[in-house]
Amino acid sequence: MTKKIAIVFLSFLCSIIFIANDSFAGWTQAKGHAYNQLTYGYYVSSHKYTTVEKAAATGNNTGLGGGNERVEASKFTAHSITYYGEYGITDTLTVFTAVPWKSVESDDTIMFSDRRGPSGIGDIDLGLRYNLTQSFAGGPLSLQGTVKTPDAYEYGNPLSTLSLGDGQYDATLALVYGKGLGKGYAVLNAGYKYRFENHEYYHFKPSDQIKVSLSGGYQIASKVGLGAIIDWTRAVGNATVSEEMEKANYPYGGKAFEKDNILIRDSLGLEQNVFNVGASAVYSISSNVQAVLSYAVDLKGAWIFETRDAGVGETYNVGLVYTF
């Protein structure tokens, strides 16, 4: 089985789960208070943007750099149920986590094996948010650190197997700024994600990433709010693949002249740039219970905000929030 599904799968890992209010923003939870959200999500992708040039006669990779073209890819779908929670340790320090259960499936997996795809707990996020000040340009400014751990699932051979995550630890450090705007709010989140090496089967390292998002919400009625987000991920360009992995890829269609080029940019999707936008609607069932509907989609974008060497997917979410 060729590993055509990795590039869209890794895009799914970065898909957005909308938070119903100013949580996951510059604000921290008050001491002893908590935010809990349970979200069902559906992700689907059947295309990708790629800079890998294809031979006109065969459709095979040439290993050369081409333009950034939208092309058809193996269909990938995922169902997920994710718990996201925050708890105020003190008024200025909040701990948070995201724990997803996933069921993933690709046309490649169905075609080349008797498995539809794995299901179970995926990558788990654990983080802390510390409020630096409540009055930076009229709003709170916080420092946020997140560690992603792959310890909850078995990671398969990335050249031939679909797994529930990308198999290595990530650490993200971000500054998060929030601003109240009458009946609404705006949030700027800017950070750097360091991605550790993966040693499970072969030595390789996904590119570190610069991550920036701008989001906001507005209360249009006493019980109804609308939200929107622009989310941008840019690869730094420091992905590496070992010579051992290059040679191991030969039975799966890899060529010696490609070196690590195709593995990084196409097969494993280790240097993805993604431009994603989304919208949400929030309905307050009671003072501490809310329902959330959201939709997000990957767009081509432009200039440095262009989606490159990444899957093009859509995410549909429905969530329930409880706060105390």
Image (cartoon, helix red, strand yellow):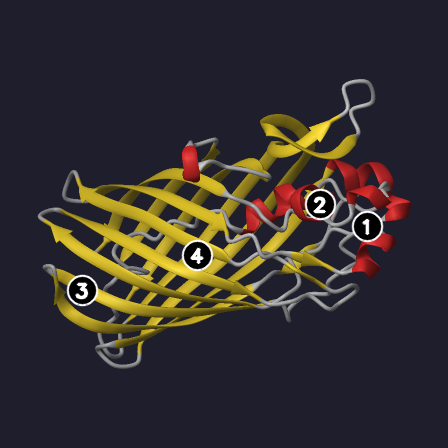
Labels 4 and 1: the sequence-earlier one = 4
Q: Mark 1 points at which residue?
A: 160
Q: Name the residue under label 3.
A: 140
Q: What residue type is labelled 1?
A: Ser
Labels 1 and 2: the sequence-earlier one = 1
Nearer-the-camera pick, 22 or 281: 22
Alpha-carbon neighbours of circle 1 within 10 Å: few (<14), some, or many (≥20)? Answer: some
Position of 141 with respect to 72 (left or right) is: left
Q: Which residue lies furthest to the top in this view?
A: 57
Q: Which of marks 1 and 2 is in front?
A: 2
Q: Mark 4 points at which residue?
A: 38
Counting from the top left corner in percent of width and height, residue 264 is at 68, 48
Alpha carbon distance from label 3 to label 2: 43 Å
> In the structure shown, which secondary structural element does the residue marked by tag 4 occupy?
strand
Alpha-carbon neighbours of circle 4 within 10 Å: few (<14), some, or many (≥20)? Answer: many
Is residue 46 shown to the viewer in this render? no
